[in-house]
């Protein structure tokens, strides 16, 4: 039997790797958005030309608060709060009163709850100020995200809206 060339083996290995490629966070996120939000795959654009990567912007936004994180659950909670604050800043110029109402309503007002409520509101106000001061020109709404724990670091994949047109904001 004839021996296969080295080039053939390399080509075969490359094709095999691509065929069995594990889905990335971005792949899973795209599939979730297609399924849950009903957006067609062809309308989802990765890294639109002329726009910075939203995942990098959002990580820069959250980075000062990461020292508060003790475990993966804390990290996910932090990113969930940051996601809410970011979108409220983009959509309502930073009025968090609706968020507070929905977040805290129906809770029994124990001493522990009041302490947690105070800390959470303080954190959210800090995030809001950071968004307005450091990222005022980024008017992209975050539609969804996936956070991956990579051992010594976290990686985030984000799907966001395109930059809002200033004429749309005034309507």
Image (cartoon, helix red, strand yellow):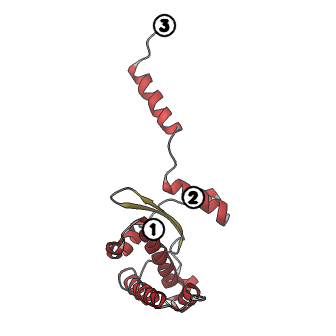
Q: Position of residue 57 (x, y in %)?
A: 39, 70
N-terminal-most mark, 3 or 2: 3
Q: Is residue 17 visible?
A: yes
Q: Nearer the viewer, residue 40 or 148?
A: 148
N-terminal-most mark, 3 or 1: 3
Q: Nearer the viewer, mark 3 or mark 1?
A: 1
Q: Secondary structure at mark 3?
A: loop
Task: Name the residue carrying label 1.
Answer: 73
Cβ–Cβ under 8 Å for marks 1 and 2: no
Q: Nearer the viewer, residue 16 or 111?
A: 111
Q: Is residue 92 above or below residue 150?
A: below
Q: CA distance from mark 3 to mark 1?
A: 57 Å
Which of the numbered marks, if any, corresponds to residue 27?
A: none
Q: Secondary structure at mark 2?
A: helix
Mark 2 neighbour density, 10 Å: few (under 14) some (14–19) many (20 or more): many
Mark 1 neighbour density, 10 Å: few (under 14) some (14–19) many (20 or more): few
Q: Nearer the viewer, residue 61 or 75?
A: 75
Q: Looking at the image, which residue is at 46% across and 73% down?
A: 77
Mark 3 neighbour density, 10 Å: few (under 14) some (14–19) many (20 or more): few
Q: Nearer the viewer, residue 110 or 120?
A: 110
Task: Name the residue carrying label 2.
Answer: 30
Cβ–Cβ under 8 Å for marks 3 and 1: no
Q: CA distance from mark 1 to mark 2?
A: 23 Å
């Amino acid at each position: 039997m004839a021996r296969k060339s080295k080039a053939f083996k390399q080509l075969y290995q490359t094709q095999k790797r691509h065929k069995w490629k594990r889905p990335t966070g971005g792949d899973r996120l795209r599939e979730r958005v297609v399924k849950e939000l009903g957006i067609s795959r062809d309308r989802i654009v990765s890294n639109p030309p002329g726009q910075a990567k939203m995942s990098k912007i959002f990580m820069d936004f959250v980075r000062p608060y990461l020292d508060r994180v003790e475990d993966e659950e804390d990290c996910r909670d932090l990113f969930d709060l940051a996601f809410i604050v970011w979108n409220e800043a983009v959509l309502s110029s930073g009025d968090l009163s609706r968020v507070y109402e929905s977040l805290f309503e129906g809770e029994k007002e124990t001493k522990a709850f009041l302490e947690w409520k105070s800390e959470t509101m303080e954190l959210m106000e800090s995030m809001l100020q950071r968004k307005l001061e450091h990222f005022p020109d980024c008017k992209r709404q975050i539609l969804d995200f996936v956070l991956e724990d990579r051992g010594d670091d976290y990686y985030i994949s984000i799907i966001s809206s395109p930059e809002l047109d200033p004429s749309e904001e005034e309507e």
